[in-house]
Amino acid sequence: DIYKFPLLSENKLIYLTKHKFNMLNLTVRGNIRPEFVKAALLDIYLKWKIPRNIEEILVIDDPKYFKEIEKRIPRKMRKEFQETYFEDPTSMSITSGKFDLIIISISSKTENYLKTNSEALQGVISHELMHIVQRRKGLDRKVRSDAIRAYKEFRPRIRKLYRYMDKNHVDQIFAEIGRQANFVLKDLYANDALIKLNLGNGILADYSNYYASSGRLIPSINYVKTGHKKITRKIRTDIANSVNYILGLMPVIVPFGRWYLKSKNKNAKILVDYIGDHYETKMSHVAKEMDSIIKYSIKNLKDSQTFRKSFFRKLFLLTEKLIKESDEYEFERQ
């Protein structure tokens, strides 16, 4: 129901829908060309859409610029939004009530390509836009609810693990893996949906540049607010971090694996193979254990309670197995 192209002014993006003009605030700060960002947004608009409920898009290369938009965030939400971003200042989408904010945070050297590669920038913006579209349709709530159901059903088995490991440690492992799995599952849905909309080339450019720019560094991929990728040089210890490391690779392996199987996209296969050769090998024992979960997700990914509960249960069963066999594995990586 969009009838005219958006009008791009200095810091506004305005487009006409069936009933009214919609306007979002676009703020670009740091060593980033505003015209470059506007052109990327226009390309997304022409290929897909800009959800009309988005109030703010912030594109920055330093977390200090977050303060530029704080006054435009409803007062009762400012503290929550600030804490959410500064807890992990990476690209993310945040929703509270009727207010939606997208932050494209290019603060890591491994993401400098986003300042010059338009297709990759379109990919990361589209990814965050899709999170908001799916969140507004209730996906986040469904993922969380099914995770809780799966956990409660598995709880009796967790209690039996206290004989193998300290109770608090066991509970912490399941909490951290469950939290990461929530974010990752939402990433699987977002990336798969973008590929189905023929927007896969953008996220392919984003992930390809991201992982290639990291070379052969040993990464540790931790959860973020919407599951978007993050790499640091430090490998952490413990079962939770080992499992979360492989989980963090699944937003590439699963959607792009499905893409190749369906459409024989060679570039998608190249990226999946690259991840296998340069990243999965750093946690080969856990990668082998998680192979069945990855294959299950590639074959069965869908927006259904059956899939989600099975996804979480399989992950909990793997965690249970690793705890029981923890003496057999060396989870600390030097």
Image (tube, rainbow, N blue to C red):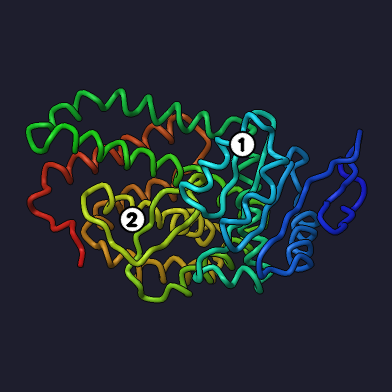
State the image coordinates of residue 288 (x, y, percent, origin top left).
25, 57
Callout 1: helix, strand or loop? helix
Q: Residue at x 53, y 36 (%)?
A: 303
Instruction: Tell me if 303 is positioned left or right of 33 in this view.
Output: left
* Viewer-closest of 186 and 297: 186
Q: Please, is residue 223 above or below residue 95 in the view?
A: below
Residue in the picture at 79% in, 46% down: 24
Q: CA distance from mark 2 to mark 1?
A: 32 Å
The residue carrying mark 1 is 78
The three-letter amino acid code for the residue at tag 2 is Tyr
Q: Residue at x 57, y 65 (%)?
A: 206
Is the residue marked by circle 1 packed among few (<14), some (14-19), or many (20+) residues within 10 Å? some
In the picture, which quadrant includes the N terminus? top right
Q: Disc 2 marks which residue?
A: 245
Mark 2 lies on a secondary structure that is: helix
Q: Are marks 2 and 1 in contact (CB under 8 Å)?
A: no
> Across the whole image, how many numbered discs are drawn on residues?
2
Q: Measured from the top left, where is residue 90 in percent x and y?
A: 52, 55
Q: Provide residue 245's location: percent of width, then percent of height.
A: 33, 55
Label placed on residue 231 = none
Q: Quadrant of residue 17?
A: top right
Q: Earlier in the sequence, mark 2 or mark 1?
A: 1
Whole-percent x and y of residue 69? Answer: 69, 47
Foreground residue among 84 and 297? 84
Location of the C terminus (image quadrant): bottom left
Q: Is residue 86 left or right of residue 312?
A: right
In terms of depth relative to the viewer, which is nearer, 34 or 247? 34
Q: Above or below — where is 236 with respect to 278?
A: above
Q: Is residue 82 left or right of residue 288?
A: right
The nearer-to-camera label among 2 and 1 is 1
**Residue type, numbered disc 1:** Arg
